[in-house]
């Protein structure tokens, strides 16, 4: 079974994906983690690396092709903003997590032990860069909510939910499959 979890930064994709992978005994892959590792390898901040990737589309293509390769293994949870789109016809269940910017930034600044202002600036730059890149590379608009509703099997607003509540909602839906 292939399950995709998408959402903007700070919506809870990683913790939810890792936990569900553990519960179900599946592999877990995160494009965000791979992106951060590439930035670290090049000794760049996420902001610097996002700017760099804007002029090097082969990096996005490489990361996205990795999703397609990993999906061939079948038993996997894939955490990626584009996984629902890239695996639209191959994934068994596609999840989208939503949350307002302010809460997402607060979550990430707490997680990364940075100031809210620093994380807000970084997040706005990264998300703008990604929107432009994904539109240019794939004609995918992450802000198109109408299209998202046709792509995803389950959309969850995480703003007022604990991680456990989000996981419970997902597990209930997975039991119906």
Image (cartoon, rainbow, N blue to C red):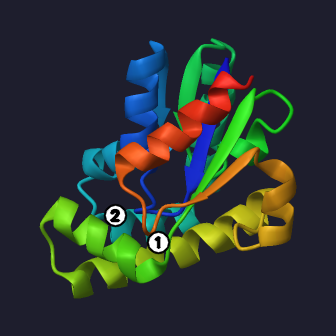
Find out whether the residues at labels 1 and 2 contact each other: C-beta distance under 8 Å. Answer: yes
Disc assigned to residue 163:
none
Q: Quadrant of the C terminus?
A: top right
Q: Residue at x 55, y 48 (%)?
A: 59
Query: x and y percent of residue 115 in the render?
Result: 16, 80
Q: Is residue 36 left or right of residue 50?
A: left
Disc assigned to residue 46:
2
Q: Is residue 173 left or right of residue 138?
A: left
Q: Quadrant of residue 57?
A: bottom right
Counting other residues with Cα less than 10 Å from the Cα at mark 1, is it few (<14), some (14-19), or many (20 or more)?
some
Given the current orientation, which residue lies at the most extreme left position? Answer: 113
Residue nearest the observer in this picture, 70 or 20? 20
Q: Residue at x 18, y 62 (%)?
A: 112
- Is 23 placed above or below 138 here? above
Q: Secondary structure at mark 1?
A: helix
Q: Pointer 1: what residue?
A: 126
Residue nearest the observer in this picture, 148 or 83? 148
Q: Residue at x 29, y 67 (%)?
A: 107
The span from disc 1 to disc 2 (Cα, nearest Å) is: 8 Å
């Amino acid at each position: 079974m292939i399950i995709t979890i998408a959402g903007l930064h700070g919506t809870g994709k990683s913790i939810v994906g890792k936990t569900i992978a553990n519960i179900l005994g599946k592999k877990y892959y995160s494009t965000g983690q791979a992106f951060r590792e590439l930035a670290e390898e090049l000794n760049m901040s996420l902001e610097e690396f996002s700017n760099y990737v804007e002029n090097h589309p082969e990096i996005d293509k490489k990361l996205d092709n990795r999703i397609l390769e990993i999906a061939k293994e079948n038993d996997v949870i894939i955490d990626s903003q584009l996984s629902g789109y890239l695996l639209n016809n191959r994934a068994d269940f596609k999840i989208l997590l939503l949350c307002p910017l302010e809460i997402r930034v607060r979550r990430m600044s707490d997680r990364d032990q940075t100031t809210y202002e620093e994380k807000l600036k970084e997040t706005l730059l990264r998300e703008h860069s990604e929107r432009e890149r994904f539109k240019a590379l794939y004609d995918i608009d992450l802000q198109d909510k109408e299209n998202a509703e046709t792509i995803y099997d389950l959309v969850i607003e995480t703003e007022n939910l604990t991680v456990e509540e989000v996981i419970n909602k997902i597990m209930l839906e997975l039991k119906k499959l």
